[in-house]
Image: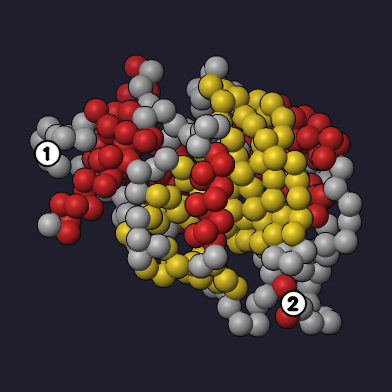
Amino acid sequence: MNTTSRCIALLSSLALGLSPLTLLAQQSDAPASGGASEGAAALRSLHWQQGPTQVTIAANSTLKVPAGYVFLDKADTDRFLELSHNLASGNEVMLAPEDLSWAAYLSFDESGYVKDDDKIDAAALLKTMQEGQEAANAERRRRGWGELSIVGWATPPFYNRDTKRLEWATLLASNGEQTANFATKILGRRGHTSVILVADLPGLPAAQRQLNTVLQGYEFNSGERYAEWRQGDKVAEYGLAALILGGAAAVATKKGLWAVLGTFFAATWKFLAAGVVAAGGWLRSLFKKKSG
């Protein structure tokens, strides 16, 4: 059975109320063929790249993946997101520790150089996010998924002018559970790299520290850094505040503001699926078998 068929079989199991990653954990000791569930087979089929290794995030940047971490390319990240009830954008790659206690999704937006001289009104931005999420929930309902609500800031927006990184964290709720999305925007010469960290609340501080350590191995290629902007390069139509709301999505008007923001938020906010840590135990055992 091919990967697509496996994924379809897995999604059909959701009617039973089971998380696909919980199914994987339950089947972690089953053999790779025959007794393994279709859910386990779908996730086993992903091409997990194990650190230490160096990967390309976009044509203009690279990331050193340390030992103890795993990486998925765009195609496999899309599959993983769908399997864990998150909307895929088609433009993200995934980084996570081998225990899958958190996950970070990276993507590059070549929308131009973002000027970093505007002010950030955290209260006004939160209100706009919450209104935009209402539109995003229409897509989640269409898929039969639980709605997401933005509770508030876990960490208010902050811009570090030395590192050219804009950071904030939002507190999300769905089906009686809460999780946090920690966002980092790394500014470059021709656009920005987005990093979305998904973690449970108790593990968020440790996950942030670990991610920040890993991101020390991320860099734009020579000639693509923020300080290397030159007169005549494309300049984005928005600043830091609008970047928090989705950049180009926040200034688009042809489809209507809320329709655009709804589409953006539907694919941006991500929830940590139940069973993900248990699935991490399976992933570690898989790597041990490969190296044995």
Q: If you read the primary sequence from the N terminus, does the residue marked by circle 1 or circle 2 appear first?
A: 1
Residue 193, position in %: x, y?
63, 61
Q: Is residue 179 left or right of residue 131?
A: left
Real-space Cα distance between discs 1 and 2?
52 Å
| Depth check, front residue: 99 or 74 | 99
Number of the label disc, if any, that sits on residue 31? 1
* Callout 2 crowding tier (Cα within 10 Å): few <14, some 14–19, many ≥20: few
In this picture, residue 190 sits left or right of residue 56: right
Q: Residue 227: which disc?
A: 2
The one of 10 and 276 positioned closer to us in this rendering: 276
Residue at 56% in and 47% down: 208
Task: Please report the residue visible at 55 percent of the width from the left and 39 percent of the height from the top.
Answer: 204
Q: Disc 1 vs disc 2: Cβ atoms closer than 8 Å?
A: no
Secondary structure of the residue carrying tag 2 is helix
Q: Quadrant of the N terminus?
A: top left
Q: Position of residue 18 (x, y in %)?
A: 35, 22
Residue drawn where x is 42% and y is 63% of the image: 65
Residue 173: quadrant of the picture: top right
Vertical placement of residue 11 versus 231, above or below? above
